[in-house]
Image (cartoon, helix red, strand yellow):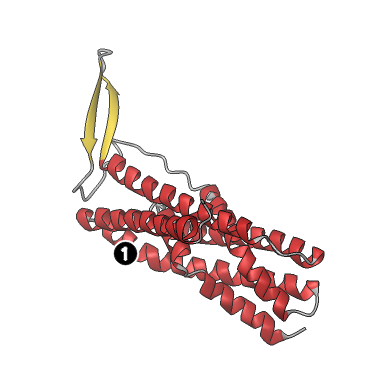
């Protein structure tokens, strides 16, 4: 077993994490985070999902000595483009929604009224006036996004692995180390992405909203480019 090959798998996994579609997906997920810790968990969950599907597809291909059909690989990449557009739209939708909160209040005399309240420009948030629960459970959304990216990226990885390994077990270990590298790389990338988002959230409302809008628009743009390249240039939809 070549240690240099396994180390290469780990390093390529870290490099793989910073591809444009991966960065766009995790950046959009980071806009949902309420703390630096939660942001890191989002990135790590993405890496876990990515690793699980890579390992599953890699196991099937290496053990059965098969290759994923090119058209299926293209279809999976196309679905990733659609998913990115959905993530970008969700960022913009939340940006618009969270600037104006709608509240229903009941007075002591039983009268109920409905009004809109904006937090835009506020430096502090009085919990006595509003209370919002933000549960930081396991980031299932990030895991699902990672699963999708793992399926879409499995073909190229598996082809590379088949050309360089001497046995299926070496190939599986290569994929596992590749996955660990991608998890660590994405966790580190999540920290980098979270720093300006967390800093701007402390008081510079226009900058914070601008960063989120940029993430949403960029994510939609990357997804649209992927759909165009795969659907039209590679003629998958014809």
Residue 51 coordinates in the image, percent (x, y): 63, 62
Image position of 10 with respect to 190: above or below? below
- Which quarter of the rendered picture does the N terminus lie within? bottom right
Mark 1: few/some/many CA within 10 Å (<14, 14-19, 20+): few
x 74%, y 73%: residue: 171
x 37%, y 39%: residue: 132
Picture quadrant where residue 106 is located: top left
Label 1 sits on a secondary structure element that is helix
Q: Residue furthest front?
A: 238
Q: Is residue 127 visible in this depiction of the protein? A: yes
Residue 218 coordinates in the image, percent (x, y): 34, 59
x 51%, y 54%: residue: 78
Image position of 78 with respect to 167: above or below? above
Q: Nearer the viewer, residue 230 or 155?
A: 230
Q: Is residue 217 left or right of residue 238?
A: left
Q: Nearer the viewer, residue 169 or 152?
A: 152
Q: Is residue 90 left or right of residue 236?
A: left
What residue is pinned by disc 1?
Answer: 196
Residue 214 coordinates in the image, percent (x, y): 30, 58
Q: Nearer the viewer, residue 53 or 141?
A: 53
Residue 210 coordinates in the image, percent (x, y): 25, 56
x 50%, y 66%: residue: 187
Q: Is residue 158 left or right of residue 62?
A: left
């Amino acid at each position: 077993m070549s240690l240099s090959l396994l180390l290469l798998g780990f390093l390529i996994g870290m490099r793989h994490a910073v591809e444009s579609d991966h960065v766009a997906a995790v950046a959009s997920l980071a806009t949902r985070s309420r703390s630096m810790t939660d942001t890191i968990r989002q990135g790590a969950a993405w890496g876990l999902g990515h690793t699980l599907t890579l390992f599953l597809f890699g196991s099937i291909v290496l053990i059965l000595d098969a290759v994923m059909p090119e058209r299926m690989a293209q279809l999976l990449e196309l679905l990733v483009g659609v998913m990115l557009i959905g993530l970008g739209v969700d960022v913009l939708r939340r940006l618009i929604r969270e600037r104006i909160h709608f509240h229903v209040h009941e007075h002591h005399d039983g009268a109920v009224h409905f009004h809109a309240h904006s937090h835009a420009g506020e430096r502090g948030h009085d919990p006595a006036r509003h209370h919002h629960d933000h549960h930081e459970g396991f980031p299932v959304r990030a895991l699902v996004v990672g699963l999708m990216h793992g399926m879409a990226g499995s073909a190229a990885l598996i082809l590379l692995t088949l050309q360089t390994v001497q046995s299926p077990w070496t190939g599986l270990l290569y994929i596992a180390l590749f996955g660990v590298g991608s998890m660590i790389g994405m966790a580190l990338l999540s920290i980098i992405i979270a720093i300006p988002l967390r800093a701007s959230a402390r008081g510079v409302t226009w900058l914070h909203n601008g960063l989120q809008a940029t993430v949403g628009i960029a994510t939609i743009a990357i997804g649209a480019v992927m759909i165009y390249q795969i659907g039209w240039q590679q003629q998958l939809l014809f």
